[in-house]
Image: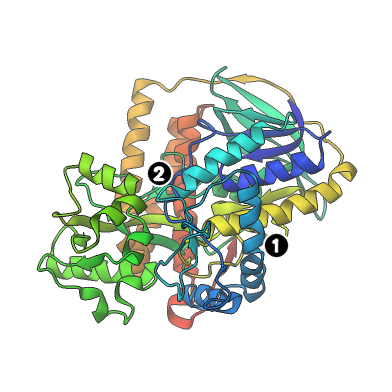
Amino acid sequence: MKTDVLVIGSGIAGLSFAIKVAAAKPDAIIHVLTKSNNDVGNTTKAQGGIAVVLDKIRDSFEQHIEDTMKAGKGINDPEVVKLVISQAPERLYELINWGTSFDANELGELELGLEGGHSQKRIVHHQDLTGKEMETKLLQKAASYSNIIFCDHYFVTDLILKKEESTTTCIGVRAIDRQKAEVVSISSRVTFLATGGSGRIFQNTTNPSVATGDGIAMAYRAGAEILNMNFIQFHPTALYTKNQHSLFLISEAVRGFGAYVIDSAGNRFLFKYDANGELATRDIVSEAIMKELQQSGKESVFLDCRHLEAEAFKSHFPTIVQYCLDEGIDFKKDLLPIVPAAHYQCGGIQVDKFARTSINKLYASGECAHTGLHGANRLASNSLLEALVFSHQAAGNVVEKLDSIPLEECEQEVIFQIDVSKEESDILNNFEKELNRLMSYNLLYTSEENEKQRVLSKLKFLDEKIEKLCKNSNPEFFELKNMIQTAMIVLEHAIKSKFLNKKETHKFSN
């Protein structure tokens, strides 16, 4: 297969990039590959919204910049922060012009919500389904371009490289066509990684099943620079369900709406840790909850919504209300049990202001990329904005250069996929459970270096074992391999990082 532009991933980063390139280059062919259906991913899961300065009387770009830098512990890239926040209104109105709907008042003015870490109301939202609304409208917009071709159920296993003396160039990818059960090579002028995050490597996560660090692992194996993977954000309010890996997210906006975080005795304990209480940043709230759980021995703390105006709450958060009701929890009279869960990967594939990686012709945007916006901790509702801005930056760069980029030939040998045996499947499942058991909040943020080293050694053993036992062309094998390798990178960066002691980042690449 050959194409002009190859996009890996169909969330907000991949789709907005594809749409802009398709519009500017109607003769160029853009293939969008997804390992599941094209509407599955972290974008669809995003509840809160997108942070945009619209109220110029009370708010300003400067305040949003300050909030972002403060949340990121000051190790954000100031130029990138300014770039992203200053573009926010323009990127928002593009979404609206593409058909995206956001909540507005009777006068047609966009409603602005408040979330933790924000000094002003600036969160534009669509009830508690903002990501799903964006994804739906972006898919519809992309479908209107005849030069955008979707290839669902293609699992990309590796980047195809052309290495010369001083440069490495990405000339395509290898992928498993899951419907035909065969491995194919795809040549492209430009490859754009929009593969999302890696939350599934952890004990608990709010991420969907596809968030397995594929882009990180592929880029790492190709020799791309990877930065600050130890900065994994845990969302403080995931709905606690015993013995469940994937937990339902209770949006940041619920605390912004006035919900309290309390312990089993009904105490609002967050003020012991930060004067902002429930509106402190996610890292502070998560750390406070973990300390309380460790001290009390309880399984969860609670979100108290009982004092809130019921009809207004239901109007703002219909998805959350219905999910809780399905679980037997009525917010009007019951407390919502919550725990922190792995939510967002602040580090990733290092890119410049045009989303270019350290490998020629390879771009990255969205959660898989490290742009410098987030620093050590992402400010709520900055992620969708970051994806839009960097995909916009990348599209402009690609459109300008595409005609001058040659299409390199990839070897087109077709290899048929080998099915996983029952024995191999059991081994893979056990390895994944062991990975999830090892990768916890406490390991990453409270354990000593020797404990991190011990777990890293175990992960290296698992990585070697899986290569020996299950080396075949099967998506399950590659997905677990990517998860283990991404977890290893997270721990390696955590061990080498000096940030916790000296407020410094660690630049680590293979």
The amino acid type found where label 1 is placed reads: Asp
Q: Which residue is mark 1?
A: 352
User: 10 Å neighbourhood of mark 2: few (<14), some, or many (≥20)?
Assistant: some
Give the answer, above or below, for where 284 lies relative to 339: below
Q: Foreground residue, 130 or 174?
A: 130
Question: Image quadrant for the C terminus?
Answer: bottom right
- Residue at the right extreme? 404
Residue in the image at 59% along x and 36% along y: 139
Quadrant of residue 298 within the rendered picture: bottom left
Which element is circle 2 on? helix
- Residue at the front extreme? 107
Q: Which residue is mark 2?
A: 462
Question: Image quadrant for the N terminus?
Answer: top right
Horizontal side, residue 66 vs residue 421: left or right: right
Count of numbered circles in the view:
2
Which element is circle 1 on? loop
Residue 294 in the image: state x and y as whole percent: 19, 67
Q: Earlier in the sequence, mark 1 or mark 2?
A: 1
